[in-house]
């Protein structure tokens, strides 16, 4: 099953032994990569979710889907010049 969401975003996930808590690794690609996306747009934003083997992760995945579904959020992510800028963007958009 593809993890490409369309609109230049992908949301892959993995359950990994030895991981104690969920982690998200964010990748931003200036040129994008081709993936099996329904809209055929290259993927420029990747939110890789890494979960412990027994974790459900539904809440974190739904939060990421909400963020990646917002065109303004995606635009801010793509304009972030540094990793610190990217962290600030995500922090502003997160809901407590």
Image (cartoon, rainbow, N blue to C red):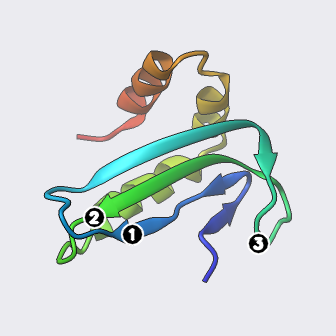
Quick one: quadrant of the N terminus? bottom right
The quarter of the picture where residue 74 lies is top right
Marks 1 and 3 sit apart, C-alpha to C-alpha, by 18 Å
Q: Which residue is mark 2?
A: 51
**Residue 92 screen position, x and y as percent:** 39, 26
Label 3 sits on a secondary structure element that is loop
Image: 62 above or below 82: below
Label 1 near label 2: C-beta < 8 Å? yes
**Residue 84 screen position, x and y as percent:** 43, 17
Image: 95 above or below 3: above
**Residue 88 screen position, x and y as percent:** 41, 21
Residue name at image x 49 percent, y 17 percent: 85
Q: Crowding at label 2, few (<14), some or many (≥20) Cα neighbours within 10 Å?
A: many
Toward the left, the furthest residue is 20
Label 2 sits on a secondary structure element that is strand
Q: In this orientation, which residue lies closer to the viewer: 67 or 16?
A: 16
Q: Which residue is mark 3?
A: 36
Image: 80 above or below 66: above
Marks 3 and 2 sit apart, C-alpha to C-alpha, by 23 Å
Toward the bottom, the furthest residue is 1
- Disc 1 vs disc 3: which is toward the camera? 1
Left or right: 44 as drawn, with respect to 11: right
Q: Crowding at label 3, few (<14), some or many (≥20) Cα neighbours within 10 Å?
A: some
- Sequence-first disc among 3 and 2: 3
Residue name at image x 36 percent, y 29 percent: 91
Q: Which residue is mark 1?
A: 14
Residue name at image x 39 percent, y 62 percent: 62
**Residue 89 screen position, x and y as percent:** 47, 25
């Amino acid at each position: 099953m593809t993890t490409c969401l369309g609109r230049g975003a992908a949301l892959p996930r993995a359950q990994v032994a030895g991981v104690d808590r969920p982690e998200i690794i964010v990748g931003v690609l200036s040129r994008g990569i081709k993936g099996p996306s329904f809209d055929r747009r290259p993927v420029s934003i990747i939110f890789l979710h890494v979960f412990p083997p027994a974790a459900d992760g539904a809440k974190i995945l739904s939060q990421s889907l909400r963020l990646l579904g917002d065109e303004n959020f995606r635009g801010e992510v793509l304009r972030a010049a540094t990793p610190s800028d990217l962290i600030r963007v995500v922090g502003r958009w997160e809901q407590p």
